[in-house]
Amino acid sequence: MSTAAISLGHPADSAQVIGRTFRSSFVSDARPIIFVLDEDASVRESLEQLVLREGWRCETLASAQELLARLPGVVPNCLVVDTSVPGTNALDLQKRVAGEFSGTSVIFIAAQIDVGTTVKVMKAGAVGIFIKPLSNHALLASIQEALERSRVAIAREAEARALRDRYALLTTRERQVMALVVSGLLNKQIGGQLGISEVTVKAHRGQVMQKMKADSLAGLVRMAGRPGLASVAESEICR
């Protein structure tokens, strides 16, 4: 492992790293953005140069007030945040980012931080916490992991949105048929429950498969079980 460090006026061999530093390949059509929040201009400049050398985009910020207004929704991204910035509470920030920006991962850096806070922010979803002086290699590995998490979260949200859009095209009757199909009922049973003929059930079922772009019953069942769609689909059974 390389011991090269960002120039912060401290020897690299004293770097301490808390959290995971898993390195993974990251591929995206849009260049990822790394947001750096630190009061120290020299730290911001050093981190910016490190990020740019990796081919990513970088935006540097000096205050917490600017941060949340600038986060992108559909571009893989992560935050590198110094916990000492005024107005920045590590746990509150992590919770807010997790709640409002599911496609954004957070990495904290600090001159020092207590074990209790470390445990809390990691449980809340932070990728890692790094104690200054920083190791280039460890930090870049953590950024790679953060971007991979971001890419996966954004892809999942896009898929969920596409499923919701398809589901919105279904008529009320088609939604009822879909809910009963994925619950395991046969066409005859569905017809009896809805008071329609088996032929009509088959016609509705065909429309459901087409509109939802499902190539099999198993595929339709998987779609119906996805977060954001499952509760809506199940509610149709009660109508």
Image (cartoon, grey):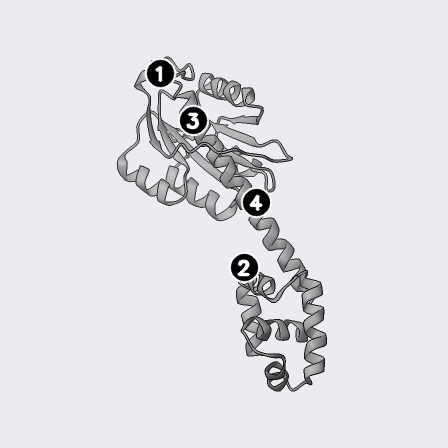
Q: How far apart are marks 3 and 1 (CA)?
A: 12 Å
Q: Quadrant of residue 162?
A: bottom right
Quick one: SS at disc 2? loop
Q: Distance between the residues labelled 2 and 4?
A: 15 Å
Disc 1 or 2, which lies upstream in sequence?
Answer: 1
Disc 3 or 1, which lies upstream in sequence?
Answer: 1
Q: Can you identify the residue that label 2 sits on?
A: 226
Q: In which quarter of the image is the N terminus?
A: top left
Residue 145 is left or right of residue 214, and the answer is: left
Give the amino acid at mark 2: Arg
Q: Residue 12 carries which label?
A: 1
Q: Residue 154 carries which label?
A: 4
Near mark 1 (Cα within 10 A), the count class, few <14, some 14-19 or many ≥20, is some
Q: Which residue is drawn at 49% across and 26% down?
A: 62
Q: Can you identify the residue that label 3 sits on?
A: 139
Q: In which quarter of the image is residue 18?
A: top left
Disc 1 or 4, which lies upstream in sequence?
Answer: 1
